[in-house]
Every structure is written in structure tokens, then in C-alpha cells.
């Protein structure tokens, strides 16, 4: 792998992906072919447009192999550590956002969360816990330490967003209350 | 019903802006909601432009769902919402120069060139004057560009509608897409890849068949990927991640910010204006031409405007004047006029063809699509004798642009010069909060947790694209145009009775397709500069 | 079916009061999610949102609209059918979602959902720009026979089938162009991309102004704005497009909830001077309320007859 430039690797990856897309994914996961016969005429089928996308990606892959060399950009190990950490924080935050309210309701409330999703304080549980976790953890991670200041900023921000959306608009629902 | 002429439509457009629902009345003069929204947008735009790490795109992404919640889904909502977005667009271009001049930190990427002469001027005690020059040049360039837009877009649209049939329209869309892929970013191959991924993403779960294609039979993919989630994910969240990582690397290591004291005469004299005006004019023309091409951004305009100005200035300047790069007012003028004159011209392809050329235009199209009742494209400019409401909206839109410019001329400069403190907001707090605000905002519009998952996922994709130096813009434009390309191609194919060569039968369509290949091929051979 | 619809309109007020008595103590146990199967900003979407707004005002309920578009309304049907049946989830779709879409996709039946009430029908006609010079569909068929290629814009697969059958019965071949939404047909006609097309009512203003003509009615009865336009049966076509907008709930919905929501919607749709009522008047020829067994029979009828249209249009 050491001799393979990131550009070449990306190019080969694109070619492989485009071929899988065009010859396996699209044919197996689409109802009609490139064209189909309907009402006595040929019409464009559902496979044609995705195949065009595959063509773009394939062409990009081939061009990457032959393009003149400029700096060989690629993600470093540091980049992967960073985005990995951010992804974990994000996933935990979104999961909390979705489930904290329903779990709390099932433990404490008489009714199920679905019916409480427009009732304070239930409707804020998910957003405060999930959103707060997300903001605080990212700040702490970027600063490499957890500070009280970060916690206050987080709380003010979360409350600020609630004030911005929930109080003035009757029809606006904070996550996750629109689709529980 | 009386027949409506062109002038009637222009007048109706102006009335639609000023005589819309009243927001409040000031000294007996009623101020319409649209006027108020343009002013709000402009102020917000200047603020986010002046805040490093934020920008017009983030402001548009966050405010769009709120605006739709306020104004609802009907055609009365169009002018206030679009006017606000236009205000943000114009304001952020002006605001970007503030930290560039005062602190050598560009507030927006296209203000980078402004630091070259702006910061030296500020250091030598001419900060206020530099800001005035920047503001004057920026607004002049912007106004010029808007005038070109207003004059050109209707004619171009009528040309398109008169001469282009469905096959030619399909070919034109393909040409635009390959042009964008080829010119945006450092590499045509990567542009093409970005575009291909955008197309693939928009084709998942959509289509004409009852089975949602490419969905693996899963419910989450079967409704398709929400357009706002994809656009905001790749553009905004990806950029937030990238910016956060830079901070993580710096670990809060920021040098102390020095602010120079103003010394001497800070006023902008008539002689100053005469001195910089040739540079403004030249750069405005350069910026407008570049802006009219879809996908080519304001950074390139600023670069070319600055370089051209530098060459000419070197020949003409008096020996005692500072050189470009050492605090020459002409340098600021050449840069700011060029990058600001992109924004108006950038709307030419949007309004006349429905093809977005930059991120701001993408958000205007998103707004129009979410609200409904206005479909940017050639059909808008149908001067029918019975009322064509879309045409009124189009002229209303032009009016809001003029209005935003007037506000920018008058109060924009004063406001902008008061925003120096914004650079001190710590980004490590600001960015995570903006991330949550963006997600909440997205949810307000889509009311589905899957939209948040999609946006987060596309944010990670956007991050990796940046790390591979792949511009996200072709992805977004591919996503926005993908559905239209497919629909137009389907219609063209059916309209020609199922002719497989429909793209090559007419000379115009064939020429477009040929150009599409030529653009890709030529961009492959030429070494390129980074011009996002 | 035409008589059925008319009597239903007359019966609407009576029905409204009687069901109201039966369901007057029902209140939703939480906010009501209203799924809308139509793209934002179109006539159908505006109709749904106006109804939601007035339901909130009139009943004090909380109604949260949500867009679920695509696949001829089947996406919306899928979203509503398994939702809790306590009246907290309803969807606005169109009758063909439960008819043609289900038959053509071979999935589901009208019994997958509980029918609540219709709100309005459509004024479906075949339209062209006036400057084409055609007066009736017959002129178009003559032109096609004379060798002119005719592009026919349609916005649903069912209408595409009808367009094809019109051609087949009259010995001509139309180039049928499918687009998304009635507005796209109007735009296509204006741009010259299409010669004729279906209009569900958006053409009303252009017809009144003399810019467009209605060449034929695609309904079982003449169009309100062009009573002289011929019917499709005059051209040997037995199929019509009687679309109506309707609200449905999940399968096995609580009867009290169903009746309460039906009467509440009927009330706002027919209330003189109300925003929803005015909008229905303008775009869809007025409110048309159909509930209970009559509605079930109508929807089942549409479902059963869709097979015949699909068979007639199959090559």
C-alpha cells in the first residue's frame, strides 16, 4: 500500500464502486431496466438515471488514474481519530435525543410518550439531554478538557434554541417530537 | 381583464414588495413585511459574514426552516423569505471584509484577498478608511451585477423557451452539470466524482416505478433522501466538522489579537473614489462575467480581479503610493468589487434556466421548492396577458435586490464598521452550538429523525470529501438538478416517440452534448488552480 | 356514480350534524399528525394545510402537518396504515392512491386504511392553448391523423393510460409525456413542450381568460367551466377520471375518532366564508363530502375498475 498514492487508490475505488453499482446494485434493486415498453412505446426505465450516475463515478475513477499530479490529499490517521470521535458523540447525542423522552415517560409518566410529546416538560427531555450531550462533548473534545464554562455555554445554547423555536411557534416541534 | 405588458409586470413586482402585508408603520409610512425581512436578512448577513467560522450558507440553512414556519406554505411567503435570503447573501459578502481588514482573518473564504491590502492599511492606522473603501467597492460591484442580472435574465429565459425543446433542455442540463464538475475545485476528476455521488444520492428511493429503487427494500430509504438533509449535511455540517478539527489541532492556541488605533483622516473623499473607481469598474465586469457561469465562485473572481488590478496598477502608480499587498486602497477595491459582483450574476442561470451556480442559489431554489408556487426557470418569464404570478414574483425578487443594495449603501456600511468585536467569539463554543442549531432547524422543516441521521451521515461524507480535496458543491448541485435531468430526459424521450438518439438529432442538443465532453476533456489536460 | 356524488353533497350537512352528535365527546388523546401526500405549495397541499389550520381553530385540536409524498400516494398510505388507531394519525390522499396505485403496484387494498371523508372532487379536462386553434378533442385527433405528432402531457399513470386508450380507440398514436403535478402540465403547454394535456382544475383562470380551451371533459359529466366540451365517451373511451381528495386513518380506527374527525373536517370544508371552503370553491368546484358506507363503496368501485383500465392500456 505504501507505493500506492491516495489518488490512485481513490480512482480504483471509484471504478470498483461504479462497476458494482452498474452491474449488481442497480439491476438487482430496481424494478425496470434502462428502458421499458409501456403503452405501445418505449419509455425510460428507472435504471437509466442511476446508471448515468455510475457512469460519472466510473469516468471520475479513470480520470483520477491519469490526472496530473497535484498535492496528494488524503485523510491522515489524526483525521480519522477526530471524525471517529465526533461520529461517536453525534450518534450518542442523536440516540439520546430520540429515546430519552420515551424512556423517561415509560418509567415515570402515566401515559406513553407519544401522547405527551407536546406537553412540557416531557417534550424537552430528549432535546436537552441529547443536544446538550452533543454540544458539551464536542466542546470538551476540541478543548481537550471539560470545563464548567463549556457546561454553562451548552445549557444556555440549548435553552436558547428551545426559546427560539418552541416558544414563538405553536406548530414547530423540536426533535424528536414530530415523528415518535 | 386588461392585457398586461412588460411594464405592468415590473410595476406589479415593485408593488408586491412595498405593498405586501404591513409589518409596522413608521411616521405614517407603512413598511411591508418584505422590506423588513430584506433589512433583517442584510443585518444577519453582515453579522455572520463578520464572524469567522460562520457565513451566509450557515445562516441561510438555519433561517430557512424558521422562515417557513413563520410564513407558511403559500405564495405570499415567497417574497419575504427569498428577500431575507438575498439580504443574507449580500450582507455576508460585505461583512466578510471586516475581520479580514481588522484582524487579518477572512470572515468568509472569498475575503482572503482583502486581507492582503486591508490589514496593512489597518496596521498603518487607516482601518476605518479601509472598511469604507471595502464597503463602497463591494456595494458598487454588487449593484452593477444586479443590473446585469435584471437586464439579462428575462431575455435569456425567453431565448431558451423559444428555441429549446425538451431534448435541447436535457442536453443543456447535462452540459451545465459537466461544466460545474469540471471547473469547481482543483481537479476535474474529483468534481465529476462529487457530482456522480450527488446524482446517485438523489436517485435513491425516487423514480417512477412503485418499487423505490436502490433502497434495499428498507423503509428508511424508500421515501428518498430529503434534499435539505443532503444539502445541509454535505455543505454545512461537513464544513463545521472540518473547522472543528482545525481547532482541535490548535487546541485553543490563538495568538493575542492586536487592534491598531485609527490615526489621521478616515474619510472617504471624492478624490479617493476617483482613484479607485477604475479598479472597481474593471473588477465588477470580471466578477459579473465569472458569476454568470454556473459553479465558478467568488474566490476565483477575487483572485482574477486582484491579479488584473495589480498588473495595471504597477504600471500606473506614482512612486510614493504603496504597492499592492502593502496597503493599497486599490487592492481592496479590486478584490471586493470582484467578489461582490459575482452574487447578482450568479442568479442569471438560476432565474433563466433553473440551474443553481453556487451555494446561495441552491438555498434560493430550496426555499422556492419548499414553499411552492415559484419554480425558478425559463417558464417564469412568460409575459402572458392574464396574470402570471411567477413573473410578478421574479420582478419582486429583482426589487428586493435593489432594495437590499440601497440599504447596503446607506446603513450597511455604518453597521459593518461596528462589528469588529465579533472576531473574539470563541469558535470552539460557537461551532458545536451552530451544529445543534442546524440539526434542530432541519428537524423543524422535515419533522423526521431520519432527516437528522441523514444530515449527520452526509456531514461525515462532506468531511471526507474535504479531506480528499473534493469540492462538495458539485455534489449539491448534482443532487438539486438530478431529478430534473431525469424528468426532462424521460419527457424528451417520450416526446420524440422513444427515439434513442434524441440527444443528438437536433443540432443544438448535439452541440451541447459535444461541449459537455469537450469541457471535461479540456479540464483534464490543463493544470488547475484551486478555485472553489 | 354521478348521482351518488350529488346526493352526497346534499346530504353533507345532515350527515355532519348526525355524526357530530354521535362523536361529540371524542377528543384526541394527543396532537394529531396529518400526513399530506402532495408536494408542498400545490393546490392539494394548500387545501390540507388550510383544513389543518381551521380544525385547530374550530376544535381546539393540535394538528401537525407532515409531508410524505411519492409513489402515487402509496408512501403516505404506508405511513398511516400501521400508525396508532386512536385518531392521532390521519392522512390526506387522493382516491386513486387506494385505487389505481394499489392495483398497478399489486400491493394493498382499500381495507388497509379507514376511510374518513372526502373533501373535494376535481374538474379533470383535456386542455390546450387557445392559439393552437383546436376546439374539441376531435380536432386534435384529426390533426394527428393528418400526420401531426401530438404530445400529450399527463400527471399520473392512470391518466397516461386514459390518454393511450383515447389514441388507441381513435387510431392515432400520442407521444405521452408524464410529468409531476398539474402545474408541470400547464408549464409544458405554455412552453410549447406539449400540445395537449390533462388539467385537474388549475386551468380555470386561463380558460376564463381565453388563453386555454378545454377540449374534452375527462369526468363522467361535463366540466363546470366548459359545459359544451365533449365527454370521453363521445370518442369511444369508457374510462373517466373521477379523482377526489380524501382523508384516511389507520386500519381499524376507533369509530368515535373516525366520526368526530369526519364531521369536523366536513364542517370546515363546507363552512361558508371559511378559508378552506373558499379555496375549494376556487380550485376544485366546491366541497364534496362523502363519508361512511357511501365513501367505502365509491373507493371500492374505483379500486375494482382500475384493473379494467390497466388491462385496456396494456400492450
Image (spheres, helix red, strand yellow):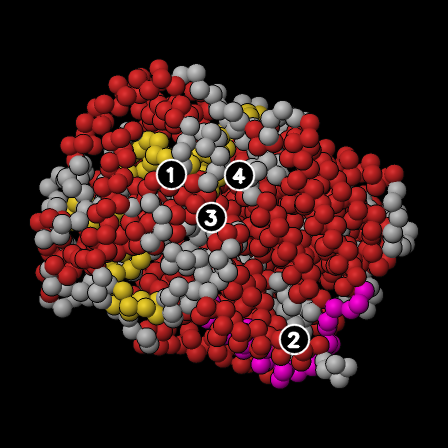
* Image disc number at residue B68: 4
Judge whether residue B187 can be spotted in this image.
yes
Towards the viewer: C272 or C303 = C303
**Is the same chain shared between marks 1 and 4?**
no
Element type at marker 3?
helix
Find residue A10 and name its label. Answer: 2
Residue C137 % position (x, y): 13, 53
Crowd rating for badge 1 (residues with CA inside 10 Å; few <14, some 14–19, many 20+): many
Mark 4 residue element? helix
Q: CA distance from mark 1 to mark 3?
A: 30 Å
Residue span colored magenta: A49-78
**C-alpha span from label 1 to label 2:** 49 Å
Determine if marks 1 and 3 fall on one subunit: no
Farthest residue toward the right? Answer: B256
Q: Which residue is mark 1?
A: C113
Q: Residues within 10 Å of mark 4 (few under 14, many from 20)?
A: many
- Dot 1 and dot 2 within a common chain: no
Q: Where is B158 relative to C17, above or below? A: below
**Viewer can see residue B384:** no
Give the letter of the chain under mark 2: A
Do marks 2 and 4 both belong to one polypeptide chain? no
Label 2 – label 4 distance at C-alpha: 40 Å
Q: Which residue is painted at 69% across and 27% down in the image? A: A108
Residue B465 place in picture, x, y as percent: 66, 65
Proximity of marks 2 and 4: CB atoms separated by less than 8 Å: no
Amino acid at each position: 500500500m505504501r507505493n500506492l498514492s491516495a489518488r490512485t487508490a481513490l480512482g480504483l475505488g471509484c471504478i470498483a464502486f461504479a462497476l458494482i453499482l452498474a452491474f449488481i446494485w442497480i439491476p438487482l434493486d430496481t424494478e425496470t431496466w434502462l428502458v421499458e415498453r409501456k403503452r405501445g412505446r418505449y419509455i425510460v426505465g428507472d435504471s437509466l438515471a442511476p446508471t448515468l450516475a455510475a457512469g460519472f463515478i466510473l469516468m471520475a475513477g479513470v480520470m483520477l488514474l491519469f490526472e496530473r499530479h497535484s498535492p496528494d490529499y488524503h485523510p491522515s490517521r489524526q483525521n480519522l481519530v477526530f471524525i471517529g470521535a465526533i461520529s461517536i458523540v453525534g450518534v450518542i447525542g442523536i440516540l439520546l435525543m430520540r429515546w430519552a423522552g420515551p424512556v423517561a415517560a415509560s418509567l415515570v409518566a402515566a401515559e406513553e410518550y407519544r401522547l405527551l410529546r407536546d406537553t412540557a416538560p416531557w417534550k424537552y427531555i430528549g432535546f436537552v439531554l441529547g443536544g446538550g450531550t452533543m454540544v458539551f462533548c464536542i466542546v470538551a473534545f476540541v478543548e481537550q478538557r471539560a470545563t464548567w464554562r463549556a457546561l454553562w455555554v451548552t445549557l444556555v445554547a440549548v435553552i436558547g434554541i428551545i426559546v427560539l423555536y418552541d416558544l414563538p411557534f405553536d406548530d414547530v416541534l423540536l426533535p424528536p417530537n414530530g415523528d415518535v | 381583464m386588461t392585457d398586461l405588458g412588460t411594464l405592468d409586470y415590473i410595476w406589479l413586482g415593485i408593488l408586491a414588495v412595498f405593498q405586501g402585508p404591513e409589518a409596522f408603520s413608521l411616521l405614517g409610512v407603512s413598511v411591508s413585511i418584505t422590506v423588513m425581512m430584506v433589512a433583517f436578512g442584510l443585518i444577519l448577513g453582515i453579522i455572520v459574514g463578520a464572524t469567522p467560522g460562520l457565513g451566509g450558507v450557515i445562516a441561510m440553512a438555519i433561517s430557512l426552516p424558521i422562515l417557513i414556519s413563520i410564513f407558511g406554505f403559500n405564495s405570499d411567503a415567497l417574497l419575504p423569505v427569498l428577500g431575507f435570503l438575498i439580504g443574507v447573501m449580500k450582507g455576508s459578502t460585505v461583512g466578510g471584509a471586516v475581520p479580514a481588514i481588522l484582524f487579518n482573518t477572512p470572515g468568509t473564504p472569498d475575503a482572503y484577498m482583502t486581507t492582503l491590502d486591508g490589514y496593512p492599511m489597518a496596521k498603518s492606522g487607516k482601518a476605518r478608511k479601509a472598511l469604507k473603501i471595502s464597503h463602497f467597492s463591494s456595494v458598487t460591484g454588487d449593484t452593477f451585477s444586479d443590473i446585469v442580472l435584471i437586464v439579462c435574465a428575462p431575455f435569456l429565459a425567453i431565448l431558451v423557451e423559444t428555441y429549446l425543446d425538451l431534448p435541447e433542455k436535457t442536453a443543456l442540463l447535462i452540459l451545465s452539470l459537466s461544466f460545474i464538475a469540471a471547473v469547481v475545485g482543483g481537479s476535474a476528476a474529483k468534481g465529476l466524482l462529487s457530482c456522480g455521488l450527488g446524482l446517485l444520492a438523489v436517485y435513491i428511493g425516487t423514480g417512477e416505478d412503485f418499487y423505490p429503487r436502490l433502497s434495499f427494500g428498507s423503509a428508511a430509504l424508500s421515501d428518498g433522501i430529503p434534499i435539505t438533509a443532503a444539502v445541509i449535511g454535505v455543505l454545512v455540517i461537513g464544513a463545521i466538522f472540518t473547522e472543528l478539527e482545525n481547532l482541535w489541532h490548535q487546541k485553543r492556541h490563538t495568538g493575542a489579537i492586536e487592534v491598531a488605533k485609527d490615526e489621521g483622516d478616515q474619510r472617504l473623499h471624492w478624490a479617493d473614489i476617483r482613484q479607485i473607481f477604475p479598479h472597481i469598474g474593471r473588477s465588477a465586469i470580471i466578477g459579473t462575467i465569472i458569476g454568470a457561469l454556473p459553479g465558478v465562485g467568488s474566490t476565483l473572481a477575487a483572485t482574477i480581479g486582484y491579479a488584473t488590478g495589480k498588473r495595471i496598477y504597477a504600471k500606473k502608480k506614482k512612486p510614493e503610493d504603496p504597492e499592492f499587498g502593502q496597503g493599497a486602497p486599490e487592492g481592496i477595491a479590486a478584490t471586493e468589487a470582484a467578489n461582490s459582483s459575482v452574487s447578482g450574476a450568479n442568479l442569471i442561470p438560476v432565474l433563466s434556466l433553473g440551474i443553481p451556480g453556487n451555494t446561495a442559489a441552491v438555498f434560493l431554489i430550496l426555499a422556492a421548492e419548499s414553499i411552492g408556487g415559484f419554480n425558478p426557470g425559463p417558464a417564469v418569464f412568460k409575459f402572458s396577458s392574464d396574470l402570471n404570478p411567477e413573473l410578478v414574483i421574479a420582478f419582486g425578487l429583482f426589487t428586493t435586490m435593489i432594495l437590499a443594495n440601497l440599504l447596503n449603501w446607506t446603513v450597511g456600511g455604518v453597521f459593518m464598521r461596528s462589528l469588529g468585536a465579533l472576531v473574539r467569539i470563541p469558535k470552539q463554543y460557537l461551532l458545536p452550538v451552530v451544529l445543534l442549531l442546524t440539526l434542530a432547524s432541519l428537524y423543524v422543516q422535515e419533522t423526521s429523525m431520519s432527516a437528522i441521521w441523514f444530515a449527520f451521515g452526509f456531514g461525515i461524507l462532506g468531511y471526507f470529501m474535504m479531506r480528499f480535496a473534493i469540492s462538495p458543491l458539485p455534489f449539491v448541485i448534482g443532487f438539486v438538478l438530478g431529478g430534473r435531468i431525469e424528468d426532462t430526459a424521460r419527457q424528451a424521450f417520450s416526446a420524440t416517440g422513444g427515439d434513442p438518439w434524441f440527444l443528438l438529432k437536433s443540432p443544438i442538443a448535439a452541440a451541447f452534448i459535444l461541449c459537455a465532453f469537450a469541457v471535461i476533456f479540456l479540464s483534464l489536460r490543463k493544470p488547475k488552480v484551486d478555485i472553489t | 356514480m354521478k348521482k351518488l356524488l350529488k346526493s352526497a353533497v346534499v346530504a353533507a350537512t345532515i350527515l355532519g350534524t348526525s355524526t357530530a352528535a354521535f362523536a361529540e365527546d371524542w377528543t384526541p388523546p394527543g396532537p394529531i399528525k396529518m400526513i399530506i401526500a402532495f408536494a408542498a405549495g400545490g393546490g392539494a397541499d394548500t387545501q390540507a394545510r388550510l383544513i389543518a389550520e381551521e380544525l385547530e381553530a374550530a376544535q381546539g385540536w393540535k394538528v401537525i402537518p407532515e409531508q410524505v409524498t411519492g409513489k402515487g400516494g402509496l408512501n403516505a398510505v404506508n405511513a398511516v396504515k400501521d400508525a396508532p388507531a386512536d385518531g392521532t394519525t390521519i392522512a390526506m390522499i387522493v382516491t386513486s392512491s387506494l385505487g389505481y396505485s394499489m392495483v398497478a403496484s399489486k400491493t394493498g387494498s382499500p381495507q388497509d386504511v379507514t376511510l374518513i371523508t372526502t373533501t373535494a372532487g376535481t374538474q379533470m379536462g383535456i386542455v390546450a392553448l387557445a392559439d393552437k386553434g383546436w376546439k374539441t378533442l376531435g380536432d386534435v385527433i384529426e390533426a394527428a391523423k393528418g400526420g401531426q405528432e401530438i404530445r400529450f402531457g399527463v400527471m399520473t399513470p392512470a391518466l397516461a393510460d386514459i390518454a393511450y386508450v383515447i389514441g388507441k380507440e381513435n387510431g392515432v398514436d400520442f407521444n405521452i409525456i408524464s410529468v409531476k403535478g398539474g402545474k408541470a402540465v400547464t408549464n409544458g403547454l405554455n412552453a410549447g413542450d406539449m400540445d395537449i394535456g390533462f388539467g385537474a382544475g388549475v386551468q380555470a383562470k386561463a380558460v376564463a381568460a381565453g388563453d386555454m380551451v378545454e377540449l374534452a371533459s375527462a369526468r363522467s359529466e361535463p366540466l363546470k367551466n366548459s359545459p359544451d366540451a365533449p365527454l370521453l365517451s363521445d370518442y369511444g373511451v369508457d374510462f373517466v377520471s373521477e379523482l377526489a381528495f380524501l382523508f384516511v386513518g389507520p386500519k381499524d380506527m376507533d369509530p368515535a375518532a373516525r366520526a368526530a374527525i369526519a364531521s369536523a373536517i366536513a364542517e370546515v370544508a363546507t363552512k361558508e366564508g371559511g378559508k378552506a371552503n373558499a379555496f375549494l370553491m376556487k380550485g376544485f368546484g366546491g366541497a364534496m363530502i362523502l363519508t361512511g358506507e357511501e365513501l367505502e363503496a365509491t373507493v371500492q368501485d374505483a379500486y375494482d375498475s382500475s384493473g379494467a383500465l390497466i388491462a385496456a392500456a396494456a400492450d
